[in-house]
Image (cartoon, rainbow, N blue to C red):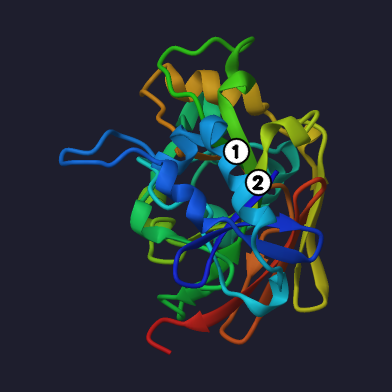
Amino acid sequence: MRICRYDDDKVGLVRGDDIFDATAALDQLPSLRWPVPAGDALVAHLDVLKPALEAAADDSHPVPVASVSLKSPVANPTKIIGAPVNYHKHLEESRADAEINLGRDIKTIDTYGLFMKANSSLVGPGEGVALRFTDRRNDHEVELAMVIGTGGSDISRDDALSHVAAYAIGLDMTVRGTEDRSLRKGIDTYSVLGPWLVTADEIENPDRLDFEIRVNDEIRQKSNTEMLIFDCARLIAYASSFMTLYPGDIIMTGTPEGVGPVAPGDTMHAWIEGIGEMSVPVRAHGA
């Protein structure tokens, strides 16, 4: 199942090149009062909602995917978790590129741990990226994103993937500088998720997916998730050893070699096997 959020917060099922409006299924969600439970309500109740989503979609008329504005398919994560330097060749590139390392000794997750991105940085591909600090280098980083379905703490590596509700494409945008990662990567619009959620049952092995990103017509990054240093299950287990994961939490798994700058007017075209493709326009903040 492919689930998207689009236009004025409609929920749809993607079938081929069309979207079928399934917003009526949200009536099945429990009503919430303050303080609301932690986590994204749609993701938390996804297993129960699936029949209602299918039924609502069957009763609707299709519209082309190309005719809508796609938002982040997760509306309310409690956190966005990033994985720094999680591909061997990106480690080599980061150590060799002074504009990335700024004189620092680049290490991996074993030393750095994970980092957090502000929830306010989350957008969908239709909203695009608004660059700040354009006098500095702003880089694209394409990644497989995991969306937690069943929360938990101290999740075992063997059981970790059963906690995933869905997968999506993630763009972990970053402005280069000396500030902490969480600040440089937590800028508004610097976390792109899309184009939709692909439920976990459709991805046989998240650790063996081809993916790439083109900026305009130039291929910048091209790799496979089998090259991850911390694989998907290990990332979940590691993250949950520090913090409780909740439904809708997003874990971006890291980016391979080939990161590079983007500028206003560029368009990023990101693709992951089994998920699809999204095009993300780049503009200047305030434009």
Q: Quadrant of the C terminus?
A: bottom left
What amino acid is at disc 1? Lys
Can residue 70 be seen? yes
Identify the residue shown where x is 58% and y is 65%.
Answer: 139
Quadrant hosting residue 109: top right
Identify the residue shown where x is 60% and y is 12%.
Answer: 159
Circle 2 residue: 54
Circle 1 residue: 50
Residue farthest toward the left in the current orientation of the protein: 34
> Does 154 sit above or below residue 145?
above
Q: Quadrant of the N terminus?
A: top right
Instruction: Depth check: give the residue in front, 190 or 95.
Output: 190
How would you rate the neighbour count of disc 1 (Cα within 10 Å): few for under 14, some for 14-19, many for 20 or more? some
> Does 28 sit above or below residue 233?
below
CA–CA distance in space, label 1 to label 2? 6 Å
Can residue 253 be seen? no
Instruction: Depth check: give the residue in front, 223 or 40.
Output: 40
The image position of residue 154, as x and y in percent, is 44, 12
The kind of secondary structure element at disc 2 is helix
Left/right placement of residue 73 relative to residue 218 reads left
Identify the residue shown where x is 70% and y is 38%.
Answer: 87
Circles 1 and 2: CB atoms closer than 8 Å: yes
The image position of residue 125, as x and y in percent, is 59, 67
The image position of residue 57, as x and y in percent, is 65, 55
Quadrant hosting residue 152: top left
